[in-house]
Amino acid sequence: MEHHFLSIEEFNALLEQWSGKNVKITKHEMNDIDETVVALDEISYARNTRRIDDYQPMHELQLNGNGITDTLSSPAELPDSQYEIPLEDTSLYEFDGERFLISTDRAVYKIELV
């Protein structure tokens, strides 16, 4: 399948179709790879206008639902029933028909159905 870039609105409309399904989120950050599986209940966004520094994102994609993250020692439940992806004005959104990619300055996130 061919990758194509999406606007945030197109990305949101396509991802909304996966509500009610299990998704796997793979985060690649530097030399670290984390995997989390979430029973996706809903998708929401948050805006943080009271940031102390640039480490905290201005915008955040929230994948709401119970989930399990794969850690080095053993799988662990998500503490808040929510997986958060920091978004930036420069974030890129891609979809190849089977998986989404979100590229930020800090990490690349892959979201796919399980």
Image (tube, helix red, strand yellow):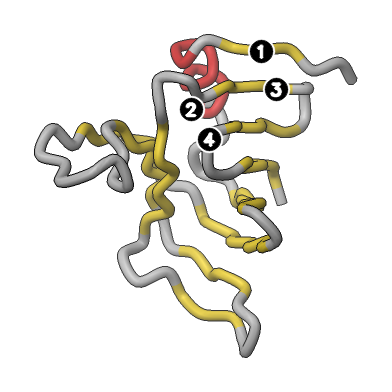
Q: Residue 112's spot in the image, x, y percent?
A: 69, 42
Sequence-wise first label, 1 or 3 = 1
* Gap between marks 2 and 4 measured at Cα: 24 Å
Choose top left, top right, bottom left or bottom right for residue 4: top right
* Residue at (67% x, 42% y) in the render: 110
Mark 2: secondary structure: helix
Label 4 is placed on what type of residue? Asp
Find out whether the residues at labels 2 and 3 contact each other: C-beta distance under 8 Å.
no
Find out whether the residues at labels 1 and 4 contact each other: C-beta distance under 8 Å.
no
* Residue at (53% x, 57% y) in the render: 38
Sequence-wise first label, 2 or 1 = 1
Q: Which mark is residue 5?
A: 1
Say whether residue 6 is left or right of residue 113. left
Q: Which residue position is annotated with label 4?
A: 105
Q: Residue 86's spot in the image, x, y percent?
A: 40, 40
Q: Residue 36's spot in the image, x, y percent?
A: 59, 61
Sequence-wise first label, 4 or 3 = 3
Q: Which mark is residue 16?
A: 2
Label 3 is placed on what type of residue? Phe
Q: Residue 93's spot in the image, x, y percent?
A: 59, 22
Q: Residue placed farthest to the right in the image?
A: 1
Say whether residue 110 is left or right of residue 9. right
Mark 3: secondary structure: strand
* Residue at (49% x, 17% y) in the render: 13
Q: Which mark is residue 95?
A: 3
* Gap between marks 1 and 4 measured at Cα: 16 Å
* Gap between marks 4 and 3 measured at Cα: 19 Å
Point out the frontmost of discs 4 and 3. Answer: 4
Mark 4: secondary structure: loop
